[in-house]
Amino acid sequence: MPLVLPSSLMVSVSGFRGRVGDPLTPELMAGLAAGFGSFLGAEGSGDTVFLGRDSRTSGTIFEAAAAAGLASVGMDVVRLGIVPTPTLLMAARDAGAAGALGVTASHNPAEWNALKFAGGDGMFLDGPRMQRFQSSLREGDPVRAAWNELGRIHDDDGAIDRHVAQILELPFVDLDAIRERRFHVALDCVHGAGGIAVPRLLEALGCRVSAMGMEANGHFPRDPEPTAANLSGLGALVRESGAELGFAVDPDVDRLSLVDETGRPLGEDLTLALCAVTVLKRESGPVVTNLSTSRVVEDVARDAGVAFTLAPVGEINVSRAMQAVGAVIGGEGNGGVILPALHGTRDALVGMALILQHLVGRETSLGEAAAAWPEYRIVKEKAAFPRERLDEGYAALRRALPATRVDTTDGLRLDWPEEGRWLHVRPSGTEPVVRFIAEARDEDGARELIRAAREALEG
């Protein structure tokens, strides 16, 4: 019989996620993994799936369940253990695997977990392919392999080292110059997978490190989303240790946030902007980001004289848009940097290398580097709102806030470029809420946009 997905399970191109125990159980995870293995097999993609997880306390049992589900349909499973999601995806791509399965809820709180599904290209399933996968789950229980055709399960503990080695070989990274600078970096890994991976990269780059949240035990001491509001502890560590800058990552290390030499959080959007400056100095080409990203990234592209494209929110949507236009760098305003020269997914590790290269190349501090660009204030809020009423709400927003430019490819984005402000309202793909993202020259202006949007939406 077909696998029945609980109504409380969040399903999107970002994967299947929910709270541990309800709806997530080992039985559900095993069933989803078996369905994924069967789907890949039916596509003719191959018979090997790479499996990795972040540090969540539920990760051990869900990893075991996923491995069992995959092997039960004849898929060989390569377990990487606790690794960054970009490490998992690179490992699957480089090995020519059929696909990859990540047991991680990324930035969600500790009581959440998820399965993220990727193909052999090391990229998450896009919308059409995800729809085909979901349809296959409704067709019935996958055919299980006979006793002598079950998949094998074995471990690979070298994926992180291979990931770091490829970063060090990038043409955008002057390894000798960075090592000679001997950066003093403060680091917050929020007890996620970064505690295992990030020190290896920073050590290879010759950095001195003052760190917090390094044990990968899944007991997050703060909200694991690395927004500026959550980085007061890292700011204090920068000041107390005398570090030159601070890096913060989320539990699966695909998002990077920055703290300057004074301990001031810079916001996640500036990560992509400064990384883009570094790449565009060496290679000219288009830049792509999503509809919820700060205008400062567009400013960087304009300054470099290259094309700039906005894509719907969702890593795979940005990745596909980057492929379509031949982008040399892109990502999302949540601190997710995508460098096609390395691979096609968000990667906090490569972001760190590019930020350090940016500072070496300009012989400047992080605060000075940030000050070189126009200053905006972005405000992000969320609220419960019935999804069946969203179209009605969008129409009310357009009437209440007539804009110069309107984009409806992902929710509703209203843009007033001549005033340096915009508003994006969309349903979340990872939580049962509607997100409000607004940017203006000052925080009051951004908050006023959100206030007006809430009033129009709820009125």
Image: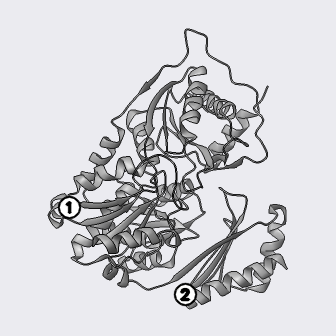
The picture places residue 62, in percent across and down from the top left corner, at 59, 35
Q: Dot 1 lies on which element? A: loop
Q: CA–CA distance between discs 1 and 2?
A: 35 Å
Residue at 23% of width from left, 57% of height from top?
A: 205
Left or right, 43 with reference to 457 = left
Residue at 76% of width from left, 48% of height from top?
A: 8
The picture places residue 102, in percent across and down from the top left corner, at 53, 41
Q: Dot 2 lies on which element? A: loop
Left or right, 63 with reference to 34 = left
Instruction: Give the quarter of the figure containing the N terminus.
Output: top right
Left or right, 64 with reference to 3 = left
- Nearer the observer, 123 or 251: 251
Query: Of the residues under marks 1 and 2, which one precedes in the sequence?
Result: 1
Q: Which residue is mark 2?
A: 420
**What amino acid is found at the position of numbered circle 1 in the picture?**
Asp
148 shown above or below 345: above
Residue at 84% of width from left, 66% of height from top?
A: 389
Q: Which residue is mark 1?
A: 174
- Nearer the observer, 75 or 326: 75
The picture places residue 4, in percent across and down from the top left corner, at 78, 35
Residue at 73% of width from left, 58% of height from top?
A: 432
